[in-house]
Amino acid sequence: GGGGRHKELAGRALAWRWAGHNVSKFGSAPPEGVSLRSSWRTHARGLPHTATSKCALAAPLAPLDIELLELSPAPAFRLPQGVVGALSAFYPDSVNIHDAAQRRLSAIRLIAKMPTIAAIAYKTSIGQPIVYPSNSLGFAANFLRMMFATPAEPYTVNPVHAAALETILILHADHEQNASTSTVRIASSSQANPFACIAAGIASLWGPAHGGANEAVLRMLGEIGSEENIPKFIERAKNKNDPFRLMGFGHRVYKNADPRAKLMQRICEQVFSGLNMASHPDLALARRLEAIALSDEYFVKRKLYPNVDFYSGIVLRALGIPTDMFTVLFAVARTSGWLAQWNESFLDPCQRISRPRQLYSGVPLRPFLPLEQRGNGPDPHAVADLPAANPADPGAAFAGGGVVVPTA
C-alpha cells in the first residue's frame, strides 16, 4: 500500500512501492511478471504460483450471472455491486472463510471475474453483444478486448494501451485504510463471505467523495472548455472565496508530489504519442493546463502538483474508457488490494468483530410519555440535572441511542 502518516511524509522525497516493487522505476510499463494478480499473490502471502493460469480459467461467468447483467436496465457503473454479491450463490464451494484453500479460490475467482463483470455491464448498457474473455491475453489486454471488440470485425489490442491500463490497475490496487478498504475489513470482521465483503467495498467506492476523483478532473476540463479560458480559471482557483478548485492537483498525504503521478505522466506521454491530438481537444486542454499550473508560482510554491487522478483520468479518456466506467475500473483494480487486506485479517490471531465505541450525547434522563402527549418541540419533561455522560468514566457504557450509567 501507499499513503502513510501525513506529518511524517510532509516534505520528504517519496518512491511508490507496490508489494515491495519500486513502481517508480518501471518506466512506461510494469516488467514481465509484475501484474495485478502476481502482486496479490505476493501481498496476500499464500496464493499459489499457479494463480495466473487459474485466474484465466476463472474469468468466465456463470450463465445466470450473465443473464442478470443482460436483463438489468441499470447503467454499467451500478451493476457490479449486486452481481458480485450474488456470486456467493453460484460458488458455495469457496465461502468457508476458515479454510485457507477456499479463501484462495475465492480470491482467484473475484480478481478474474471483476473485469468480465465490468465489461459485460458496459456492453449491455450500450446495447452491444457481450465478448467473452480470452485465455490467450493478459489481464489488462483481455479487459480492453471485452470492452471494445465486436463480432463484426477483428480487434487487436494496442500493446501501449494494455501496458498503460496494467499500470493504472497496479497503482490503484491498494492505498492504505481508505473508506472502501476499511469497509471490506469491517464486513470481514463479522465473518461474512468474501463476495459480500467485496460488494460492500464497491458500495463504499460508489460514493463520489471516494471513487470519483478522476471523473471530477474531466468534469473540470469540461467546465474550463478551451485553452483560452485557462488563465481565468487559474485565477479563480487562487481565490479562496471562489468555490472553483483545480481538481487533480495536490494531495492530502503527498505534500511534495504524488510519486504515482510521475509514473502516470510517463504513461501519458506514451499513450498520447499515438493519438491525433487535434481530434481530442479535451486532452490537449489537460496538457496545456498541466503546463501552466506547473510553471505558476502560486502552485509551485504550495507544491500543488498534478496527482495520479489528474493523469489517470485523461489517460483513461485517451484509451476510450467512458467516464461512467472510471469508478467501475477503480473497483476492478482495488479488488486485488481489498482481497489482500481481507485475507490478511484472518491471519491476525487477535482478529475480533469491528465494534467502534459510540458516545451518547443526548438528554441524560427523561420520563416516558405516551404517544398522544408528545409534541414536536423541546421536551419540557426532560430531566437535565443529571450530569452528562463522561467518556472517561469507566462506569458508563455507551451504546446506540442510550447510555447506561451507575445508579449509585
Image (cartoon, rainbow, N blue to C red):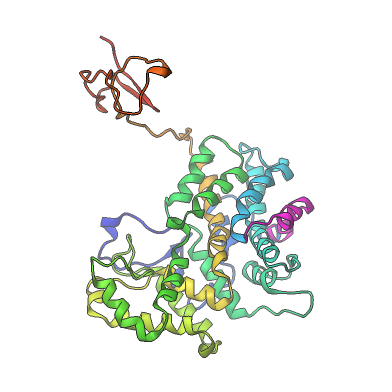
Number of numbered callouts drawn: 0
Query: Which residue shows up at 53% across the image and 82% down it?
Result: 271
The residue lying toward the viewer, choosing from 271 and 297, is: 297
Q: Quadrant of residue 165?
A: bottom right
Query: Which residue shows up at 79% across the image and 78% down it?
Result: 152
The residue lying toward the viewer, choosing from 262 and 289, is: 289
Q: Position of residue 397 (x, y in %)?
A: 34, 22
Q: Quadrant of residue 145?
A: bottom right
In the rendered structure, the answer to whether residue 326 lies left or right of residue 380 reads right
Query: Which residue shows up at 75% across the image and 65% down it?
Result: 132
Q: Quadrant of residue 51?
A: bottom right
User: Is residue 106 placed above or below 353 in the rendered structure?
Assistant: below
Tell me, yes or no, whether the highlighted magenta stretch contains residue 63: yes
Is the C terminus in the top left, top right, bottom left or bottom right quadrant?
top left
In the rendered structure, the answer to whether residue 189 lies left or right of residue 288 reads right
Q: Say whether residue 347 is visible.
A: no
In the rendered structure, the answer to whether residue 167 lies left or right of residue 154 reads left
Extent of the magenta region: 55-75
In the rendered structure, the answer to whether residue 262 lies left or right of residue 65 reads left
Q: Position of residue 69 (x, y in %)?
A: 71, 56
The residue lying toward the viewer, choosing from 281 and 201, is: 281
Q: What secondary structure do most residues of the magenta stretch adopt?
A: helix
Tell me, yes or no, whether the highlighted magenta stretch contains residue 345: no
